Amino acid sequence: MTESPNPNIVDADSLTGEMHPIRRGVISIGSNLGERRHNLQGALDSLADTPEVWVTDVSPVYETEPVDSPEGVRDYLNAVVLLDTTLSAQMLLERALAVEAAYGRERTDAVNEARTLDVDLIVLGDRRSDEPHLRLPHPRAGERAFVLVPWLDVEPDAEIPGVGPVAELVEKTGRDGVRLREDITLEVQ
Ligand SMILES: Nc1ncnc2c1ncn2[C@@H]1O[C@H](COP(=O)(O)OP(=O)(O)OP(=O)(O)O)[C@@H](O)[C@H]1O
Ligand SMILES: Nc1nc2c(c(=O)[nH]1)N=C(CO)CN2
């Protein structure tokens, strides 16, 4: 894996003085409704503007066929964001959900309905969680080419803890339905 910050490095919470380790985070962003590139760039900017989050890289943008989605929904634009953070997994998830809401994400009971913005936590250091509101590593990431392929571009030796190296997972999923959009790029501020 790309060099992770030393887990012994800690950052003091400015309010409580509590010390938190810095961990590497991987976030998948996707949009298949509205101004797709604008929504992804907004997600990236909002993550970069988050206190205690340092965005270190963003992947190329891919146009991807909708997976496990209702008939007729539009293709997604997907990308992967790498960051360092001292936030807890719960705080990072809350931020992700707030960023989705800020970009007009509407929730219905439909499964995988079209959405302006999807922000999923894929991994946070070696944090494991199996609670319904917070699963880490993301339980479906290892089967999703729309997560793995962009992630591999920016972190060739990436691994999903407990699942395996991303390069091997891409060999299993293949790259069907995932197409590089060289004409669309995201900018880290
Ligand atoms: N690692 C995670 N990242 C984002 N949300 C998560 C995670 N683990 C659990 N959740 C929970 O999943 C809930 C539903 O998320 P959402 O509706 O965005 O799912 P989805 O992105 O449509 O589907 P999928 O989970 O298959 O990517 C969120 O409210 C959140 O609490
Ligand atoms: N291509 C693609 N398909 C999906 C995506 C996504 O981001 N891209 N997100 C989903 C739920 O998170 C379900 N299906």
Image: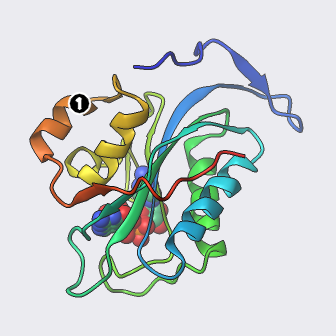
Quarter of the rendering containing residue 74: bottom left
| Residue in front for this viewpoint, 120 or 179 | 179
Above or below 43: residue 89 = above
**Residue type at mark 1?**
Ala
Above or below 119: residue 166 = above
Q: Quadrant of the N terminus?
A: top left
Residue located 18% across and 37% down the image: 169
Residue located 69% across and 57% down the image: 46
- Count of marks overlaid on the render: 1
Q: Position of residue 127 (x, y in %)?
A: 45, 33
Q: Residues within 10 Å of mark 1 (few under 14, many from 20)?
A: some
Q: Which residue is mark 1?
A: 167
Q: Is residue 178 left or right of residue 188?
A: left
Q: Can residue 128 be spotted in the picture?
A: no
Question: Where in the image, quadrant-wise, is ligand 1 located?
Answer: bottom left
Q: Residue furthest front?
A: 183
Q: Position of residue 52 (x, y in %)?
A: 74, 38
Q: Position of residue 181 (x, y in %)?
A: 39, 57
